[in-house]
Amino acid sequence: MVDAIDFMLGGKGPLRDIPERVGYDRILLGIENLNGKTFTIHRSMAGGSFTLFEGLHVDAMPTDKGTELHEAHRDNRDDNLSRFLLSEIGLIDKRIRRNKANDTNSLSFRNVVRLAIVDEEEIIQKRSPLSDGNLVADTANTSTFKLLITGVDDSSLTSTTRATSVEQSRMGQLELLDELIAEQQAQIRELSGPPKELEDQDSRLEKTLQSRAAQLATTETQYREASAKRRDFRKRRQDAEERLVEIQVLLERFALLQRHYGSDAERLKGIEEAGTLFSSLSDGACPLCGAEPAHQHKSEACEGNPEEVVLAARAELGKIALLEDDLSKTIDQLKKESRSLERRLPTLEGNIAELSTFIESQISPNLRSMRQSYSEIADKKAEVREALGLFRTFKDLQDRKAALEAEVKNSGGDPADSDLPSSSIHRFSTVVLGLLKEWHFPNVESVHFDQRQRDLVIDGKNRTSFGKGLRAITQSAFSIGLLEYCRQQATPHPGFVILDSPLLSYKEPDGEDDDLRHTDLKQRFYHFLKGIPENQQVIIVENTDPPADVQALPQAVKFTSNPGDGRAGLFVLEQGNPIAPTG
């Protein structure tokens, strides 16, 4: 809500990307000046220029084209939002001091509105309400504050001696450091916690990572062992199958050889039988050479001697018998080996299937889960380390900026020094003191404004030295006090103050001195707001319930986050169709 109002008063944005934004494309902001004239400012949710319409347009968009107003302030043109708003509060064509050389800038409405809108981070900061944490910008902020409490700008100042190259270099470095710090802050806002929590988280993640690494190593070893065993069973199965094929080929070949042996044995038996019959025949012509008995030489050796042929055949038969016997034994061994391999194969298959099931159903899923978990923890640890790195970088940038600011101050060139009139500062401090007393701020007796620190000193104690709860209350007193002072002294002011969570901070106090839960400050604070004049507007955005009588006021709006109970939120729905929120 605070961001949306600031966005509609010239803030850069972008607006937060929250689910409730879906369906909206524009914002309408209604304003009314002290003369009772009303306007409606229109702007796209994406940013850019504004369109100004006369009158308030709540239920429907105006039919006329309106007046286009650019978002960037230009002092020589009236077609921008800043000049329009400045003209409405009587601050048109004012100039403010921006450095110690008395150089001035044209006053922008953004210079003024930063003193009227205080967000939830700024309200508890340990720095002056006139400081953005940017030494270069603090001069302009202080000059704007002086303009509001005196009504006098810095247009009469004459530029003095230009800054030396060393001073210019320092100021340039400060501007660069401010830009880098702003970038780091934007990234740090997205982190999950402060450095101490991140360091504890990093330590826990490191222990978890070591534990997971040990478990992962054990599981991977188990996986490698099971896989190696499965490969061994598969190798043995492959060897057995190859051996079975080899045995089958050998048995087929040996069967063929066995048939050859049988054929040879049959032939030799025929020779043996024929030779035996030869010996029993009577003399006659030789069956081999055809010689008659009278011409046969029986005393000489003859190749066709039947007896020798029979003996030779018998000798060959003996050899074949031995070979057949060896062959039969070899075949029997091969068959026995084949049967053994065939019996072994199902066991190997079973072992392989069992190991595969074990690996796929238990080890592999567990290993994948552990690897994923390890990877996620490692990624988270890297994110935490990166976040810690951001904090270290942020701390280093802040230290360098503090050292550079100290150099600037020691050289007598504090660009934020400003000659705030003592009488005006005294009257302003008196207004703030009156507010704190009316709110029953504990034991408050005196308030004065320290020009060097550009902040309030309450009962001799710097405002920034209080706990965050009291800092939020005193920041509220500063902002509301400035509005009251300007109305009393008839000096220019936007006429409104917006405070984000001024009371929530002391719900969880920093310590006993910061604990206001058992006081009536909250009731007194709201009681004061009930009585503010009509020419002042204070908008409080708070997460704690105000007193019952305040809740009953027509200007009190309770956001319930429940569509069926009161107003659900800033973004509302009507019959399922989004309508632009109004302010």
Image: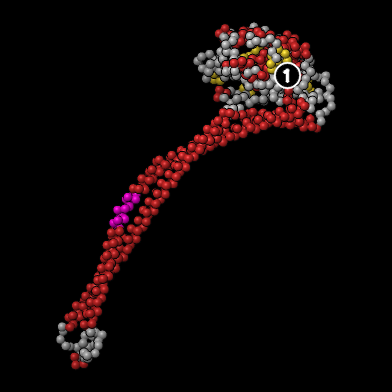
246 above or below 460? below
Q: Which residue is mark 1?
A: 454
> Is residue 470 visible in the rendered structure shown here?
yes
Q: Main secondary structure of the magenta part?
A: helix
- Can you tell which quarter of the image residue 418 is in? top right
Identify the element where label 1 is drawn.
Answer: loop
Residue drawn at x 48%, y 38% as measured from the top left: 212
Q: Residue 354 at what x, y percent from top left?
A: 36, 45
Query: In the rendered view, does 546 fall on the left or right side of 249?
Result: right
| Depth order, front residue of 379/31 | 379
Query: In the rendered view, does 103 fall on the left or right side of 583?
Result: right
Q: Residue 136 at what x, y percent from top left?
A: 74, 26
> Is residue 103 visible in the rendered structure shown here?
no
Q: Residue 500 at what x, y percent from top left?
A: 62, 17
Query: In the rendered view, does 167 fall on the left or right side of 475?
Result: right
Residue drawn at x 77%, y 16% as measured from the top left: 420
Q: Residue 291 at what x, y percent from top left?
A: 22, 90
Q: How is the image coloured?
A: secondary structure
Question: Magenta residues?
Answer: 338-349
| Depth order, front residue of 222/490 | 222
Residue drawn at x 75%, y 13% as measured from the top left: 425
Residue drawn at x 59%, y 18% as measured from the top left: 511
| Depth order, front residue of 215/27 | 215
26 above or below 321? above
299 above or below 206? below
Identify residue type, mark 1.
Arg
